[in-house]
Amino acid sequence: GEDVEQSLFLSVREGDSSVINCTYTDSSSTYLYWYKQEPGAGLQLLTYIFSNMDMKQDQRLTVLLNKKDKHLSLRIADTQTGDSAIYFCAEKGYQKVTFGTGTKLQVIP
Amino acid sequence: DSGVTQTPKHLITATGQRVTLRCSPRSGDLSVYWYQQSLDQGLQFLIQYYNGEERAKGNILERFSAQQFPDLHSELNLSSLELGDSALYFCASSAMNTEAFFGQGTRLTVV
């Protein structure tokens, strides 16, 4: 079945870049997503990439997709304290979205 | 606002009791997903419904059940509650070719 894996925790200094990694198993994935969950809130879609793309940039966010290795990453440039949250990677297969367990990003001032 | 509505926002109940969580998906979305988020286990997929039918099942306990009604809203029923069931329960909805949109969650506390 589908599986999505992420590391649980990442700590960076304010102003540095953060890179959150994710691996998935479903080769038929059509979309891959990054969601952000701030404390006490639901998950909000940050960005997504089609499975036929290698890279997508959106302001401070860069998504890289290596389809051969089934590896997805999210780079946040100039990380701010407001970026502290849990980041979930997700992949969309046939009629179903599968989420990773989330990476908690801690930004140190 | 994601368009997905969950009620209630908070629920406190005693062990052994039964509760029902409700989810109204975004207008037109046929898929509804339920997730459990506890402090130490991240986001756990429980179950998915598509247009009223169960489509996928995750780590859902036998004490838990769900259904999706003809108007596409969904309910998650949790019975014989235990302390370990305390968690945030999220509902999400999606259309065929879109991302999942999440509700704000129901925080369940079992005392």
Image: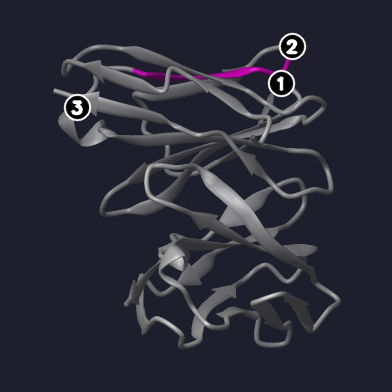
Number of marks in the image?
3
The residue type indicated by label 2 comes to: Pro
Q: CA distance from mark 3 to mark 2?
A: 31 Å
Q: Quadrant of the N terminus of chain A?
A: bottom right
Decide which of tag 2 and tag 1 comes sooner along the chain: 1
Tell me the amino acid under the disc marked 3: Glu
Disc with the residue nearer the chain's start (3 vs 1): 1
Q: Mark 1 is on which residue type?
A: Gly
Q: Which residues are magenta?
A: B71-78
Q: Is residue B52 left or right of residue B12?
A: right
Query: Mark on residue B82?
Result: 3
Which element carries disc 3, helix, strand or loop? loop
Mark 1 — residue? B52
Where is residue A92? Give x, y as percent: 71, 57
The numbered dot on residue B70 is: 2
The quadrant of the rendering that contains the C terminus of chain A is bottom left
Q: Nearer the viewer, residue A26 or B1?
A: B1
Q: Looking at the picture, tell me which residue is in the foreground, B56 or B72.
A: B72
Task: For label 2, count other residues whose C-alpha is less than 10 Å away and answer few (under 14), some (14-19) or many (20+).
Answer: few
Q: Secondary structure at mark 1?
A: loop
Q: Mark 2 and 1 residues: CB-CB less than 8 Å, in contact?
A: yes
- The image shows residue A108, relative to residue B4, as above or below, that is below
Relative to A101, is B77 above or below? above
Q: Is residue A1 visible?
A: no
